[in-house]
Amino acid sequence: MTKTIFRYTFIAGVSILILCALLFFGMQYTQTKDETYKALQQEAVYAEQGLMLNGIPYLETLGDVNRVTWINTDGEVLYDSMFSLPLANEKDCPEVAEALKKGEGQGIRTSESSGESTMYYARRCQDGTILRLSRPVRAMREAFMAVRPFIWILVLVLVISGILSFKIAKQIVNPINAIDLDHPEANKYPELRPLIEKIEEQKITIQEEVSSREQMRREFSANVSHELKTPLTSISGFAELMAEGEVPGDKVQEFSKDIYKESQRLIALIDDIIKLSRLDEEAEEPNWENVDLYGLSGEVLDSLRPVANKQGITLKLTGSPISINGVYQLLSEMVFNLCDNAVKYNTPGGSVTVDVSEKDDEVFLSVADTGIGIPTEHQKRVFERFYRVDKSHSKEIGGTGLGLSIVKHGAQHHGARVKLESEPGLGTKITLIFKKKAN
Ligand code: ADP
């Protein structure tokens, strides 16, 4: 950060300096050029007067600062201070042509051989002849000479701006580095207070999150131990009685059935724990595909039909085939858990209706039953792990207490929402709301 602040402040300083220097140099260059032109113009006026009075001998006295050329109206050179006659016709030279037409003309030409630029000024005399004065333009060099004394100042300013940039960067960064998060009240800079307050808030949020996770973890372990222990204690008790020969022959089948039922409960519980921990890990699911929710719901209902028939519960599927992008296995478990609950917590002769529909950019899968319903005070908690409304009957009803947790986590995995509507004594409707273009 120090380096970045230093770099930017230094670059800003240097850029301003270079721009100022270029501006100064440009102004100096234009001024030198203007002055040369004005000098040529002035000298040409005097030269014309002398020429008109004394002729060529006057021109010969003019010295060698300027080149002086006298040209007649046909472009023939009558006199040239630098070259002896005869010289080429000058009528086509731009400044000469312009002077013949308008009274005066000017131009700058660069010699191909020497690369030096020359400024020409031509003036029409009273007798119609042209008097031309020219001089090399050294505006660049002169501008550079004018600027030269300032170069040292420029270098000095650059060094000073480097040192200042470094100090500024340090002064900005040092107080941030010096923040003592254990003693935020020791901060001397009011500008840093909002930042420190934000960090403090974040610290508290993280601490709360950590402790609530820890609490959840402890509750979960306690619940798992309890849920595992109950069927295992039964299995162990039944097996012990059978091993000691205390079970009469006609009861062996019944005891074996109980052992089988309890072990099935254990297997289902362990299966659900594994599913949940996989969802907790948010492991990358490779099997994302187009899943037809209507077809999938049909398969789930078919698998539950034997159990439902036993209790006289009617299973219905309404809506139309609609596909979403999802993980088939997980979606199937979610819909199974919802339908399984809808059957388990139903009343004899009741019904379960699964509906698949879509509206705007959302897809809805709802499972509605005409069962016992969930009292309002329990509705928020039924998605928690191992939470059951009626704990005393959970053994006979079955279930692991993890079904709705899997639904909630599965929905999160698919970017879906879960909506619960329930009326005790009337029934329950749980809706999964998927985004159509999820993932
Ligand atoms: P369980 O294995 O006990 O069914 P769930 O997580 O699936 O566990 O459900 C948690 C609790 O929510 C259940 O014990 C039950 O009390 C209540 N519940 C879930 N679905 C329904 C429903 N369709 N009707 C009434 N109560 C329900």
Image (tube, rainbow, N blue to C red):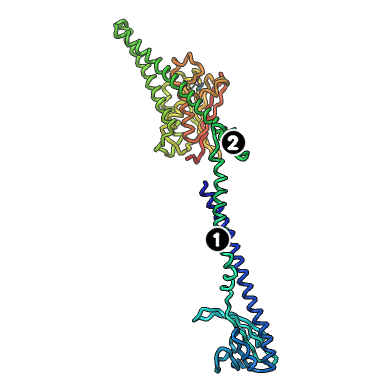
Which residue bears the numbered disc 1?
A: 155
Q: Residues within 10 Å of mark 2 (few under 14, many from 20)?
A: some
* Viewer-nearest residue: 391 or 281: 281
Residue 66 image-quadrant placement? bottom right
* Separation of residues labelled 2 and 1 (CA atoms): 39 Å
Residue 89 image-quadrant placement? bottom right
Q: In the displayed structure, would residue 389 be above or below residue 244?
A: below
* Viewer-nearest residue: 376 or 83: 83
* SS for dot 2: loop
**Is ligand 1 less than 8 Å from the beta carbon at label 1?**
no
Find residue 389 and report its horizontal and vertical position in percent: 51, 18
Q: In the displayed structure, would residue 439 be above or below residue 261?
A: below
Q: Nearer the viewer, mark 2 or mark 1?
A: 1
* SS for dot 1: helix
Q: Is residue 171 visible?
A: yes
Q: Give the amino acid type for the residue marked by disc 1 in the picture.
A: Val
Q: Give the amino acid type for the residue marked by disc 2 in the picture.
A: Asn
- The mark tally for this picture is 2
Badge 2 vs badge 1, beta-carbon distance below 8 Å: no
Find residue 142 and report its horizontal and vertical position in percent: 58, 73
Q: Looking at the image, is mark 2 or mark 1 earlier in the sequence?
A: 1
Find residue 129 and report its horizontal and vertical position in percent: 65, 91
* Viewer-nearest residue: 419 or 280: 280
Find residue 292 and report its horizontal and vertical position in percent: 45, 36
**Residue at image x 56%, y 19%?**
375
Q: Is residue 254 visible?
A: no
**Residue at image x 47%, y 26%?**
405
Which residue bears the numbered disc 2?
A: 187
**Residue at image x 63%, y 90%?**
61
Residue 28 image-quadrant placement? bottom right
